[in-house]
Amino acid sequence: MLTALTIKNYALIDHLQVDFNSGFTIITGETGAGKSILLGGLSLILGKRADLSSLKDPETKCIIEAVFDISNYHLKSLFKREDLDYEPQTIIRREILPSGKSRAFVNDSPVNLSSLQLLGSQLIDIHSQHQTLQLTENTFQFQVVDALAKTQKDLKRYTDDLKEYKKAEQDLQALLDLKSEAVKEHDYNTFLLQELVEAQLVEGDLEALEIEYETLNNIGAVKERLSEANQLLSEEQIGAITTLTRLKGTLEKLTQVSTTYDSLFERVQSCCIEIDDIYAEVDALQDRVEADPNRLETVSSRLQVLNGLLQKHQVVTVSELILLRDALTEKVGVTENLDEAILAKEAEISKRAAALDHIAQTLHEKRTKAIPSLLKQLQKILIDLGMPNATFKIGVEASATYQSNGKDILEFLFSANKGGQFNALKKAASGGELSRIMLAIKLILSKYIQLPTIMFDEIDTGVSGEISNKMGDIMLQMSANMQVFSITHLPQVAAKGHAHFKVYKEDVAQKTQTNLVQLNAEERVTEIAQMLGGLELTSSAVAHAKELLN
């Protein structure tokens, strides 16, 4: 429930701070005194978009803060989903900056407007003529019937199962689409895969083959160069081996003269060992290198296959061809196993449908059973509200289609006159009749579910004194289970409240301000007497006011 409200720099309000209690609270005031301003401020707390023109002083930010006791509202899961800190005493603050920017906070954590609207809808229901039209909406009508039918747990189970059922249907459609595409591509993919498998791809194979091909294709030049190298090394007169051997002998003689030349001799000796090694390897290579036309043809053919595959698949490495081969293997395998997967998914959907049908049937039975009680209670309340001939027909028919809340089609039909034709509510009921019907339904709902704080904005407009008295009784009755506010011009309703606040305007420093003050017992008599007889108090109006209050 709403326990405190603070408004600063909003419209005609400079600074307003007020505390509220549970039960039935009345708000009165002359037309134009600012009751709509109060509702506008509350609407910002509930997530309405801000307007820079709302600032009383355009140079100062506007702050609206409301404190709610939500300990009985079962909202912990909502706070968790929205990533908010849950507090039994929750504070919602809205700020409008002079720049035009707006900020919102829940327990000092910044929130966006969608989260604020979601939370706000669970805290306050501002009920005006516009909200009365909600009564004609099928979703709200289901909520009414389901409250009496106590289907909350069944609906939760149905909603969860329906989500899984729809996901399974989407999965099946994806499999069917995949199969449709796969059938077209299966033969081609199989052909491509066969080519890649027959190629016996090995990572690094292409590079090794290219080296071998270059060697085999240039065998004459290789042999010629190896022969030339052999000759340069071993030629008897000027070969490298002969020359180094002579150099080694010369230096060896120098070492006998002085140890200064030992290091130089050892280096040349190492060169002699290395050059002998080189000669032996060149000699061995020369013996091994032979023309091999068959191998050259084999290597050439293999390179043509690999390069052809690279060009065909528009890749540059054998590694990429291997990845493509593996992907095609999986795709062909999936295609061949699709029928099995489709059958399994169809079986899952059939099983989920059976579970949904069972819950839907339970919902249908509970709703059907609850409707007579709803009709009986509605009839009784509407008689008290001056609609003795008002009659409802509520039909619930099972359909073959899964809806968001079961498989039922719900129809609210209404006739305002005895013997009159039944028609849809929005066609058969006037605005005043809809207001009274909504009030009756809210009273019934308050007995079955925890409703948020409700603020009736002149719901009693245009009704007679006796009917307004009954409406006041109903709102008072509702306040036993919830916090109820009523903005009213009728003294019969105003006298029913546990607390009474007055909205008024006053001029301060050449500026008009709106204020809200709680009336004490004496002030309340005066206010109701003025509502009865005008600003000039008469003894009869005062007596009547006291009578109403008592």
Image: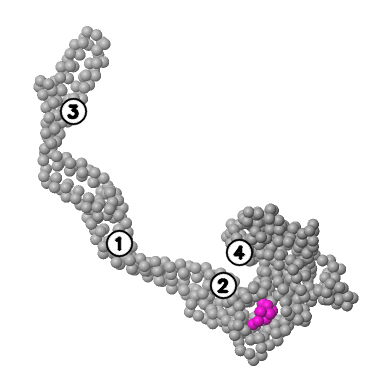
Calculate the distance from the C-alpha at mark 3 to the C-alpha at mark 2: 90 Å
Of labels 1 and 3, earlier in sequence is 3
* Residue 437 in the image, given as x and y percentages of width and height: 67, 79
* Residue 456 in the image, given as x and y percentages of width and height: 70, 72
The crowding category of the residue bearing disc 2, from other C-alpha atoms within 10 Å (few below 14, some 14 to 19, many at least 20), is some
Of labels 2 and 1, earlier in sequence is 2
The crowding category of the residue bearing disc 1, from other C-alpha atoms within 10 Å (few below 14, some 14 to 19, many at least 20), is many
Nearer to us in this view, 76 or 494: 494
Q: Residue at x 75, y 76 (%)?
A: 472
The crowding category of the residue bearing disc 4, from other C-alpha atoms within 10 Å (few below 14, some 14 to 19, many at least 20), is some
Q: Residue at x 72, y 77 (%)?
A: 461
Q: Which mark is residue 154?
A: 2
- Is residue 219 visible to the viewer in this orientation of the structure? yes
Q: Residue at x 66, y 56 (%)?
A: 95
Q: What amino acid does circle 1 point to?
A: Val
Q: Tell me the magenta residue range.
A: 429-438
Say what secondary structure mark 1 lies in. helix
Residue beneath disc 3? 278
Calculate the distance from the C-alpha at mark 1 to the C-alpha at mark 3: 55 Å
Of labels 4 and 2, earlier in sequence is 4
Foreground label between 3 and 2: 3
**Taken as a whole, is the magenta stretch helix, strand or loop?**
helix
